[in-house]
Amino acid sequence: MNSIKITLAGMLLALLFPAPGRAQRVETYTDPVTGQKYAAINAEELPRNVVVRKDNMDYYVDANLHKYTVDGNNSDPVLDESGNQVVVKRPKRHEYSDYPTSKRFIISPTDVYNDGTTVTGTIPDTDIKNSPIMDWATANGWLASANSNTPDVTSSATAMGCTQYRGKDGTDEPGTWRTPTYREGILMLIFREQIEATSAETGFQPFTRLVFYWLGTESGPVYAWAMRISQPYELTFNYNSSKASKTSRLRCIRDVE
């Protein structure tokens, strides 16, 4: 089978192991700089594997930045004013294992396009129309080579996907948003109804039903995890999504703790 279907109760019991009488919370978070409001998940009461990721460079790597091309070929380096190749931060690539969950993170209120915007247009510096569906490497801001190599390889970066999303008002620094991990995706699906219920305050638009959303967690050199809401309380995770040939949607998150 290419997917795993798990009930809400099964997810909670088998994967999250919440302590008796305690639960994760959905909150409305107000950005202290912009004043924008976002739906947030506070996972501090998970019993294990929770970390403060905001400004924690242990979970990032340096990567050389290249211009975007659809297939990753003939991708020229991006140079700074001195002629040196630009280096950017990217979340570390990882497989499932026990990769930790962010203590507190906010969620983009809309689906994000492959160039980091939220409306139809053209990918910067190209004549390529942007799209709400994309391959895994594009979603994570990597050159296409990341679709066919193992997570221990630090691939070259491109200015695409969640790394280019800049928040509701477009002022967040590039690289501050990322794709959710497998465990963070579980939390988003478990608390989907509560997240969507913040719409009056946050403008959160419902997740698109019956389609997959990319997660940052990989499952080998050519596969990655994706999540889908198939119907209420029946949640599907696909660990066998081809990074190169499967095109999925994108919701981005930002660590606030």
Image (cartoon, grey):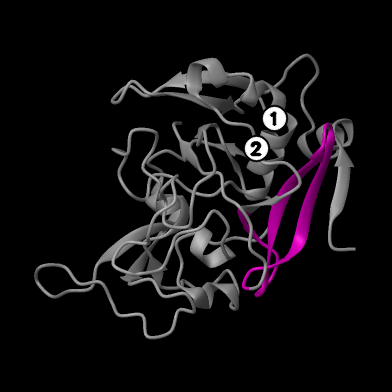
Instruction: Reply above or below: 84 against 211.
Output: below
Asked if 162 appears above or below 159 in the picture, the reply is: above
Q: Is residue 224 above or below residue 156?
A: above
SS of the residue under disc 1:
helix
57 relative to 67, above or below: above
Res. 192 mark: 1
Mark 1 surroundings: few (<14), some (14-19) or many (≥20) residues within 10 A: some
Q: Check disc 2 and report the residue beneath it.
A: 207
The outermost residue toward the left is 82
Quarter of the image with the N terminus is bottom right
Q: Are marks 1 and 2 in contact (CB under 8 Å)?
A: yes
Amino acid at dot 1: Arg
- Which residue is drawn at the image coordinates 60% and 78% (left, top)? 148
Which amino acid does the dot numbered 2 rest on?
Phe
Q: Which mark sits nearer the N-terminus, 1 or 2?
A: 1
x then y, percent, for residue 147: 58, 73
